[in-house]
Amino acid sequence: MNRRIKYSAWSESASYYIRDFSYKNGDYIYKWMKLNGIGESSYGKYLDALGRKPDVFYHRLYGHHLIYDFPIQNPENIPDFLEHVLISDFFTKQGLPIIPGDIIEIPEVKSLFHKVSLKWNFINGFDLLTGTLAVYNNYKISSDYFKQEASIEKIDELAKILGISGIHIALALSTFNPLFIISAVISGAGALVGLLNNPYKIYFRQVAQKYAVFLSVNSYNIDSVIEQYDINAVVKSYDINNRDYI
């Protein structure tokens, strides 16, 4: 268990370093893409123009969703769409929308986002990397608890799990990355299940898994049983000629 937590900490630290480096150097990355004309095709400019309206703060809500706005009806635009959206915009600070703007315009959804910042609706490539690793690592750490193969019996084990959840919540609030919220929920649920798991049942199951029972059908052949208890065989066994006397 400690090895898994250590692996989780190292892998997440590495991915978060990449994310932090990209954010600090985001302007250089953006200028480099502009300088090399990445995403600057006429179709890319058309996508940017879709959301540049006076009442729209995040122009990428419109025309930039990787699935919803994919130009399947106009396959000739697919290369320019992928270059502009997936290469140019996905690795900038703002990233791409999770829910497209047309769906957010639905009154029920729009009322929800009036209470929650629209920043939560965007994710870039580096945040996706760190968030996905966080979710995966916390699932691997908690999987033994969910499968009832481990339990939390020491306070330091509980502190480590809850510490990871707390760090991920802090990262989620500071980076507006919803994947860290999911990761923290998985970690918290794993800790709760681990506390409720019965350690004696888990120990007995682990011991029982080391043994196996093998049944040989041939050893219980019905014909051999019938022959053994046949009346003629029983009578013959009492024949004086079949007995050995000293």
Image (tube, helix red, strand yellow):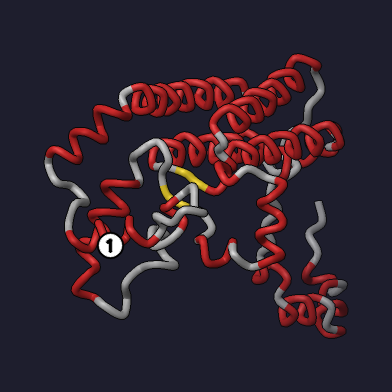
Q: Residue furthest top?
A: 156
Give percent across and percent down for residue 71. Answer: 32, 72
> Is residue 166 toward the left or the right of residue 171 in the image?
right
Name the residue: 78% across, 27% down. Answer: 152
Q: Quadrant of residue 99?
A: bottom right
Disc 1 secondary structure class: helix
Depth order, front residue of 2/77: 77
Residue 226 vs 29, above or below: the answer is below
Q: Quadrant of residue 160?
A: top right
Residue 124 vs 82, above or below: the answer is above
In the picture of the structure, the residue carrying the numbered disc 1 is: 46
Number of residues whose C-alpha sits closer than 10 Å to that of mark 1, classed few (under 14), some (14–19) or many (20 or more): few
Name the residue: 64% across, 25% down. Answer: 170
> Is residue 115 toward the left or the right of residue 84 in the image?
right
Q: Amino acid at mark 1?
A: Tyr
Q: Is residue 62 visible?
A: yes
Give percent across and percent down for residue 76. Answer: 19, 74
Depth order, front residue of 75/104: 104
